[in-house]
């Protein structure tokens, strides 16, 4: 066991855990004021549920010995257990905790796409299946010694395993749930439902940006400053280029400097570089980020035209750019990339792997969401509750409730002392 490696990976895991604060702020800020509390409740629920179920079941399915498709051992392991997919330089629980926070990240991607109309109970049920089964199965294919890893598929920190999988599950949920009431007019034209709090959304993106240095840098699983320094540099450059690319693209398309699109562009750059941050150089990471920023703008607009209502753009940010970022490894990888003389072999493997991961997550998500529609009450809140807002109708509170007003001794209204 290496103490320095353990400290670095634990620190990175803390940063990844802190990303959930970023997700909570982004999703609640991008949604309408009347649903902010429910969004926050779902985000914290995801962390709690994924933590328990990934430890009990998901970790074994992902890293245990088994077949090329699924792990069959290592469930709820004790600290001295031998797990086939765990590295030798880290205590088992350090590695397990690092992987656990990744699992929670994949599951929380779904929250934003189904916001403002999904029932809490069925969302929790879906999150349970996602974090305990769907995500670990794809993770086993890539990081647990499964069939994709044997083919040479490269996904360093999870453009496919975490983000494309999360995006696939999110697309399934948004599709089955249908759009929010009032999102489309009688002719099928989308109507704007603007974010209610841009300061929260911007702060959330910056927190996610910071956390990504642990997300990608920690995936080295060792405190090696050379590789880690390169990884965090290209991560930052791709995010920066993604922000700029999305801002320019949305200005070109709409004539407006749309902050929400630009913020999603930064996230798109982060998602896209995640697969190849260890094999893509700084200059090429700028290109990856710009393309991801443009792609997320076009992806959001495409889904809206197709009737898929995604309040925060999760499918485009994580699904579409997760696929692109995985393919970018086949184009720009310093060893084996098409533009470095490697031919199309790696690109073919990357395409097979990312579409397998996204496709499996989407198909499994459709099945689970469809099954949940058969439960009493279904997967969607009552129409009146949706129009009133889930904070009041489902949670019984308002995110920005005013203090009761009293009367000042001089006859002036004042805030009551409580």
Image (tube, rainbow, N blue to C red):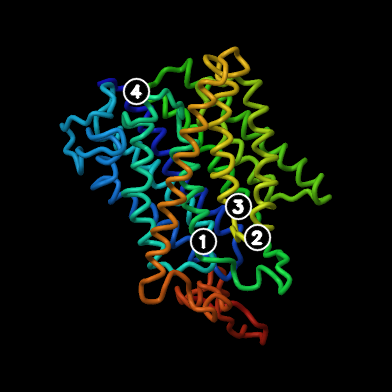
Q: Could you tell which of marks 3 and 1 lies nearer the N-terminus?
A: 1
The residue under label 1 is 114
In three-dimensional space, the C-alpha distance between marks 2 and 1, rounded to whole angstroms, equals 15 Å
State the SS at label 4. Answer: helix
413 vs 274, nearest the viewer = 274
Label 4 or label 1, whichever lies nearer to me, is 1
In three-dimensional space, the C-alpha distance between marks 2 and 3, rounded to whole angstroms, equals 12 Å
Quick one: label 2, few (<14), some, or many (20+) residues within 10 Å?
some
For this view, does 303 lie left or right of residue 107? right
The residue under label 3 is 313
Q: Are marks 4 and 1 in contact (CB under 8 Å)?
A: no
Q: Residue at x 39, y 30 (%)?
A: 148
Q: Could you tell which of marks 2 and 4 lies nearer the N-terminus?
A: 4
Q: Residue at x 70, y 68 (%)?
A: 188
Q: How many marks?
A: 4
Q: Could you tell which of marks 4 and 1 lies nearer the N-terminus?
A: 4
Q: Quadrant of residue 294?
A: top right
């Amino acid at each position: 066991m290496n103490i320095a490696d353990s400290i670095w990976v634990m620190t990175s895991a803390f940063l990844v855990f802190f990303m959930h604060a970023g997700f909570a702020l982004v999703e609640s800020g991008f949604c309408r004021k009347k649903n902010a509390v429910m969004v926050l409740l779902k985000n914290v629920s995801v962390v709690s549920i994924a933590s328990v179920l990934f430890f009990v079941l998901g970790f074994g399915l992902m890293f245990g010995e088994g077949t090329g498709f699924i792990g069959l051992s290592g469930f709820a392991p004790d600290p001295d257990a031998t797990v086939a997919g765990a590295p030798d330089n880290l205590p088992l629980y350090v590695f397990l905790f690092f992987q656990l926070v990744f699992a929670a990240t994949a599951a929380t991607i779904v929250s934003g796409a189904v916001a403002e109309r999904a029932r809490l109970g069925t969302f929790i049920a879906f999150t349970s299946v996602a974090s305990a089964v769907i995500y670990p199965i794809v993770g086993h294919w890539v990081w647990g010694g499964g069939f994709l890893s044997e083919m040479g598929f490269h996904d360093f920190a999870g453009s496919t395993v975490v983000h494309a999988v999360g995006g696939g599950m999110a697309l399934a949920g948004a599709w089955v749930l249908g759009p929010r009431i009032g999102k489309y007019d009688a002719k099928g034209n989308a109507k704007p439902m603007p974010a209610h709090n841009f300061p929260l959304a911007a702060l959330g993106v910056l927190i996610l940006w910071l956390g990504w240095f642990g997300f990608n840098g920690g995936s080295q699983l060792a405190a090696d400053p050379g590789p880690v320094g390169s990884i965090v540099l290209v991560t930052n450059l791709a995010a920066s280029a993604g922000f700029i690319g999305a801002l320019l693209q949305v200005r070109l398309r709409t004539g407006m400097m749309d902050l929400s699109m630009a913020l999603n562009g930064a996230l798109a750059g982060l998602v896209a570089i995640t697969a190849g941050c260890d094999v893509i150089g700084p200059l090429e990471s700028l290109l990856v980020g710009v393309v991801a920023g443009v792609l997320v703008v076009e992806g959001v607009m495409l889904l809206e035209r197709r009737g898929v209502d995604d309040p925060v753009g999760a499918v485009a940010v994580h699904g579409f750019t997760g696929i692109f970022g995985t393919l970018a490894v086949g184009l720009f990888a310093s060893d084996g990339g098409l533009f470095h003389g490697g031919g199309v072999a790696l690109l073919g493997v990357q395409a097979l792997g990312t579409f397998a991961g996204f496709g499996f997550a989407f198909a499994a998500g459709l099945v689970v969401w469809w099954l949940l529609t058969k439960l009493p009450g279904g997967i969607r809140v009552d129409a009146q509750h949706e129009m009133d807002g889930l904070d009041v109708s489902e949670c019984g509170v308002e995110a920005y409730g005013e203090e009761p007003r009293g009367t000042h001794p001089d006859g002036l209204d004042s805030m009551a002392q409580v």
